[in-house]
Amino acid sequence: MNVLVTIAEFLVNEVLSVPAYLIGIITAIGLIALRKSAGQVAGGALKAVLGFLLIGAGATLVTASLTPLGVMIQGALGAQGVVPTNEAIAGIAQEEFGAQVAWLMILGFVVAILLARFTPLRYVFLTGHHLLFMATLITIVMASAGMPTVVVVVLGAVLLGILMVALPALAQPWTRRITGDDSIAIGHFGTAGYIAAGVVGRLVDPKGRSRSTEDLKVPESLRFLRDSMVATALSMVLMYLVVAVTYLARAGQETAFGAFEGGATGVGNYLMQSVTQGLQFGIAVAVILFGVRTILGELVPAFQGIAAKVVPGAIPALDAPIVFPYAQNAVLIGFLSSFAGGLVGLLVLGVWLGPVLGLALILPGLVPHFFTGGAAGVYGNATGGRRGAVAGGFVNGLLVTFLPALLLKVLGTFGSANTTFGDTDFGWFGILIGYSARTGALPGIVLLIVLGAVLLGAAILMQRRVVDTGWDPSPARAPVGAGAQAGADEASRPATTHPRVAPPVGAPTPPPPPGE
């Protein structure tokens, strides 16, 4: 009997409670269900385990890189400075909440598949890294509010599953405006920013007179911004140097040099240590991204294969870059406009909202602004042409600045980690569940159930009354999606002879127009 107890304790404490091993086991189960060979199962499970360990290694590097920056921002600006990076905050949280996150993510996918099977919301969310990030956010927020672990995992999984089918449905009218059909949906937790961009695009060009961004020529010299590691490292180096110089001027050499472990030996060494830390942040994020991709390279195909059998006729909800090829110039315009919105938002936080509400300063990063701002530019262009791309990207930039600042209030001890979740849906959803959970265990559970029910009901209503009826969010404009162009007159097609900015590496190719 004691042997059985010992074995059970070993399995629970040393295997199932270790996120890396848990992910490996789930991956193996999924691959077995797809009837993969023994070698494929073993290899896939091991790669998933190694991927999770890579996330932890990257998180250690992120923490080491952000610590001096936090000290310098606090000294230079008198306020906490935060760099929104989903990978960084998710990696840091794995050490404390790794097991809960893993269970919540897996159960959330099961809930989403069941909802897709038995409701009109037939969307299968396949952006695995965002699934991991949202599971991490829900776990952090609910656990920080003092909710029991069982409630966090079970109720959190239900909320995650609802988000996975509801958000693609809420954005589908605007996504269809881009693609021309319902062959794909957006599966990315920046959906609120994309919907806002589509709405703003219609407002700034109600008569459809603004020309498409695809009639513009974009400099080839900006192509380097497509590389996420380069863009991340560049943005962090610039931030480090600006903050370091400000801190040095304000605090003096003796204090400023102490921001780095071991100190700096001179001004030149101080500046070069700043450059090095910025570059190391880029490396750390790249390590975390590689770990996430390693996990999902095995886990997502297993999920996708299972979903295909359970949900006939499902619509795949894919990552934000899926819309990039439809309006590649709009991607760059949206990114630049979003970054400008981030700078304006930072100014507002520093001068007004920060001191009044005690909010941290959210520093604009190139990577979140590129991916969410670029997609927002595509959505804005679909409803408002060039005006819409500019306005939509700018609004997205404001949202990914103010929402993370407010989100920090409900992240508990992680609110002082000098990094946070960056995309819009993490912000508004985290704030809602955070303040709901803080009302107490029982009231919090009731409020969270109501929140999930309202979100699910709104999505079903949107699907039946808006998506299924073919509502067009910008009827004054000619169709711009590839699918819609197939049946349009040749004169209505946008110009295609000028240089384009290619989508980021790994961006999926949009489906071909009907009939091709």
Image (cartoon, rainbow, N blue to C red):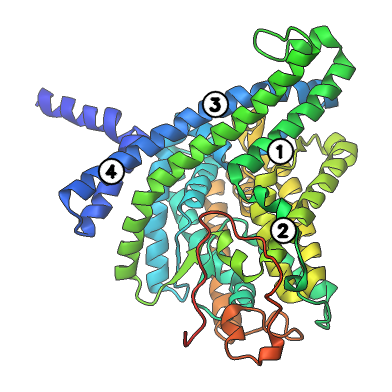
Is label 2 in contact with label 3 (beta carbons under 8 Å)?
Answer: no
Say what amino acid the circle numbered 1 marks. Ser
The residue carrying mark 2 is: 332
Q: Which mark is residue 61?
A: 3
Looking at the figure, which quarter contains the N terminus?
Answer: top left
3D distance between C-alphas at marks 1 and 2: 16 Å
Say whether disc 1 or disc 2 marks the residue closer to the N-terminus: 1
Q: Earlier in the sequence, mark 3 or mark 4?
A: 4
* CA separation in Å, label 2 and label 3: 30 Å
Residue at position x 45%, y 43% in the image: 292
Disc 3 vs disc 4: Cβ atoms closer than 8 Å? no
How packed mark 3 is, by other alpha carbons closer than 10 Å (few <14, some 14-19, many 20 or more), is many
Q: Residues within 10 Å of mark 1 (few under 14, many from 20)?
A: some
Task: Residue at 65%, 46% (x, y): give it.
Answer: 367
Instruction: Work out how far the residue at label 4 is from the one at label 2, CA to CA, in angstroms.
Output: 38 Å
Q: Image height check: is 450 above or below 288?
A: below
- Residue 452 at x, y percent in the picture: 53, 59
Q: Which residue is mark 1?
A: 235
Front: mark 1 or 3: 1
Q: Which secondary structure, mark 3? A: helix
Q: Earlier in the sequence, mark 1 or mark 3?
A: 3
Name the N-terminal-most of marks 4 and 2: 4
Residue indicated by mark 4: 45
Q: Identify which residue, 463 or 394, lies in the foreground.
A: 394
Query: Residue 390: x percent and y percent?
Result: 80, 63
Label 4, secondary structure: give it.
helix
Examine the image and state in which quarter residue 74 appears: top right
Report the front residue among 143 and 365.
365
Q: CA distance from mark 3 to mark 4?
A: 25 Å
